[in-house]
């Protein structure tokens, strides 16, 4: 296992993970992000294994979203190392991260209102023909529709009409479109940021069912949520962030809601993270 | 997927209640305006606006009038094709009129004849350098190049300095007009070669406009470039998070707009057989107006080339109609202004209606 982590995606020499990666799909070591003087993320070590569903919890400003933006390369990290799928990675931008297999459902959903469902699913990586035409390469609408339908089926998402623009869809439908993206592209790791924050009871249930489907299919997931019941229901492990640092790493069986809240608010810190508090 | 299947939360979708495309509304408006002029013509002038009433000419329609309607908007229409794309990304381009002037001046000076009526054309800009009677490809290349550079500067300013497109292109509008005046110290450039004069002769402007309109209609509908143009206008953040290189794409869009202004400059100076520093004045606003009348949303993300072409037709019909009714040009401008505002009001009303699901 150790030998295949010495090169990065482009084949260049890259830092080797000091622990065996094995079935670890994503590992960060010392991940740090400063916005000028603000230390939004400090020395973060994190691991998620294949098939595992991990929740990230923490108060507002704890660094959860910053963490996501670093591993998805929406922003470039200040310091630290990231291994993904057995290889050391330094993604140039979000498209590269997505192509490598990290699929993110952002809180703002990252959907374009005036485009329809397949257009949104394939935004930024359209199926095309005549690729020698560069930016003027021709869209394969039929292929994208077909793949969209398969992706929707796989997640059990029902969208009444694919060719409608999404601007008048309900929050739940939009969320489903965003989630269906992950299924369409056979991602290796799915990240969801507050997927049910703005949804009604029924819609929340539907989204949670989709997440359960992903679990059954062995797809790893990082779930950022404030909803304790949801986290306890859907995840194997809970990692708690506070003021930019990881303060606890809890197995679901070994903890409960009150315990997690204590870590979130700062009443408790796990001994191995004591220097963080 | 036409079946009204159950969506999330048991929502259903009624396919019979799909709203008409926005272009349909513009087309209806166009027909209505033509009908109004036809009726007014029959009532006031005892003549037909649209149909042939002369006995010595064959044909059902007044072909000459139809030609003029299209011809007089085709040059600004070419500009409007580029402006449409800029507006779809959520931007604006105020510089096209000035780019037309600067480009026409520079391109025309490479298209001058060496002799007029057997006398040497010593007033040709590059006479002393011997750059007269050049093959037509050279002024065409120069013209397209000028438009491209101006558009590229617009694009770089908008994409990489973070200043609003309004300001960036306002700067270009002033500067390009300066370039147009500086090039010959304010002197007009005339006497193009025959091959250059052929570019905009007769109905050529219409053919060029039609060709470019079809080309860019296909590009916006069927290419990645088009899809990303809409995506950026719809939600720039979403486009960025989806991995679209937004800045680079904007540079491309503004460059194409500049290039089309360059093409318009070639056609216009060829048609007029002269280039002047003051030409193309207010073209940028007419082009924006055509787009807006055609249903292009200034908020970005919505609209089409077809809409802009229809908007241009409405423009042409109004100008011809007022001439037909022998009304002064003042009224023309007043009504044009009202139609621009009216088009946007109608469009927003339509949008709101769609939003509440009527």
Image (cartoon, coloured by chain):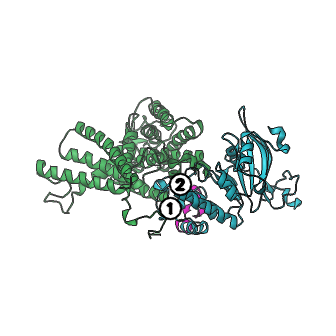
Foreground of the two, B126 or B315:
B315
Where is residue B8 shown, x and y percent of the image? 51, 62
Residue located beneath label 1 in the image: B9
Q: Which residues are magenta?
A: A127-144
Q: Quadrant of the C terminus of chain B?
A: bottom left
Q: Is residue B312 left or right of residue B112?
A: left
Asked if the magenta segment contains residue A58, the reply would be no
In the image, what residue occupies the spot 85% across and 43% down?
Answer: A271
In the image, what residue occupies the spot 79% across and 50% down?
Answer: A249
Label 1 chain ID: B
Foreground of the two, A52 or A144:
A52
Q: Is residue A135 left or right of residue B109?
A: right
Instruction: Answer whether residue B134 is visible to the viewer in this image.
Output: no
Asked if the magenta segment contains residue A140, the reply would be yes
Q: Is residue B101 above or below residue A73?
A: above
| The chain coloured cyan in the image | A
Label 2, label 1: how far apart the Cα atoms are: 9 Å
Label 2 chain ID: A
Which hue is chain B drawn in?
green
Q: Is residue A196 above or below residue B4?
A: above
In the image, what residue occupies the spot 51% across and 42% down?
Answer: B151
- Is disc 1 placed on a helix, strand or loop? helix
Q: Are marks 2 and 1 in contact (CB under 8 Å)?
A: yes
Q: Which mark is residue A200?
A: 2
The answer to which image quadrant residue A243 occupies is: top right
């Amino acid at each position: 296992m150790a030998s295949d982590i010495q090169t990065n995606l482009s084949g260049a020499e890259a830092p080797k993970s000091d622990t065996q990666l094995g079935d670890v799909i994503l590992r960060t070591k010392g991940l740090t992000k400063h916005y000028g003087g603000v230390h939004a993320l400090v020395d973060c070590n994190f691991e998620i294994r294949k098939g595992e569903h991990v929740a990230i919890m923490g108060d507002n400003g704890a660094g959860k979203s910053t963490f996501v933006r670093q591993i998805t390369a929406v922003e470039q990290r200040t310091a630290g190392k990231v291994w993904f799928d057995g290889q050391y990675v330094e993604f140039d931008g979000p498209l590269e991260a997505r192509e490598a297999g990290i699929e993110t459902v952002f809180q703002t959903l990252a959907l374009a209102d005036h485009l329809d469902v397949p257009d949104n699913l394939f935004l930024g990586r359209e199926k095309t023909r005549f690729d020698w035409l560069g930016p003027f390469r021709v869209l394969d609408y039929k292929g994208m529709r077909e793949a969209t339908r398969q992706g929707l089926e796989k997640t059990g998402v029902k969208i009444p009409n694919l060719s409608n623009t999404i601007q008048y869809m309900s929050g739940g439908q939009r969320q489903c479109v965003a989630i269906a993206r992950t299924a369409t592209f056979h991602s290796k790791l799915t990240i969801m940021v507050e997927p049910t924050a703005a949804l009604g009871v029924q819609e929340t249930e539907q989204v949670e069912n989709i997440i359960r489907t992903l679990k059954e299919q062995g797809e790893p997931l990082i779930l950022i949520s404030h909803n304790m019941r949801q986290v306890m229901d859907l995840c194997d492990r809970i990692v708690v962030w506070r003021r930019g640092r990881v303060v606890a790493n809890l197995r679901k069986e070994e903890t409960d809601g009150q315990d997690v809240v204590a870590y979130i608010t700062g009443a408790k810190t796990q001994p191995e993270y004591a220097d963080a508090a | 997927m036409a079946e009204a299947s159950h969506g999330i939360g048991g929502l259903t979708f009624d396919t019979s209640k799909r709203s008409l495309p926005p272009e349909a509304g513009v087309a209806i408006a166009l027909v209505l305006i033509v009908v109004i002029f036809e009726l007014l013509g029959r009532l006031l002038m005892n003549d037909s606006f649209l149909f042939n009433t002369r006995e010595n000419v064959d044909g059902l329609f007044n072909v000459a009038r139809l030609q003029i309607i299209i011809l007089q908007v085709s040059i600004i229409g070419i500009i409007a094709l580029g402006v449409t794309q800029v507006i779809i990304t959520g931007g604006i381009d105020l510089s096209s009129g000035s780019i037309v002037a600067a480009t026409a001046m520079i391109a025309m000076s490479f298209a001058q004849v060496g002799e007029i009526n057997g006398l040497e054309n010593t007033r040709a800009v590059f006479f002393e350098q011997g750059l007269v009677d050049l093959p037509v490809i050279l002024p065409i290349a120069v013209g397209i190049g000028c438009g491209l550079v101006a558009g590229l500067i617009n694009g770089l300013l908008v994409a990489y300095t973070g200043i609003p497109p309004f300001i960036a292109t306002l700067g270009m509008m002033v500067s390009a007009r300066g370039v147009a005046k500086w090039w010959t110290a304010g002197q007009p450039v005339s006497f193009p070669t025959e091959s250059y004069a052929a570019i905009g002769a007769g109905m050529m402007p219409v053919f060029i406009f039609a060709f470019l309109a079809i080309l860019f209609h296909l590009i916006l509908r069927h290419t990645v470039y088009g899809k990303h143009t809409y995506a950026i206008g719809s939600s720039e953040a979403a486009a960025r998070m989806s991995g679209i290189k937004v800045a680079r794409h904007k540079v491309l869009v503004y460059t194409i707009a500049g290039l089309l202004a360059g093409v318009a400059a070639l056609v216009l100076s060829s048609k007029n057989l002269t280039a002047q520093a003051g030409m193309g004045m207010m073209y940028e606003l007419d082009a924006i107006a055509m787009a807006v009348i055609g249903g292009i949303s200034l908020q970005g993300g919505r609209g089409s080339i077809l809409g802009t072409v229809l908007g241009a037709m409405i423009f042409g019909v109004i100008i011809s109609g007022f001439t037909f009714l022998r009304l002064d040009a003042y009224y023309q401008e007043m009504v044009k202004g009202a139609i621009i505002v009216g088009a946007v009001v109608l469009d927003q009303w339509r949008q709101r209606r769609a939003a509440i699901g009527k």
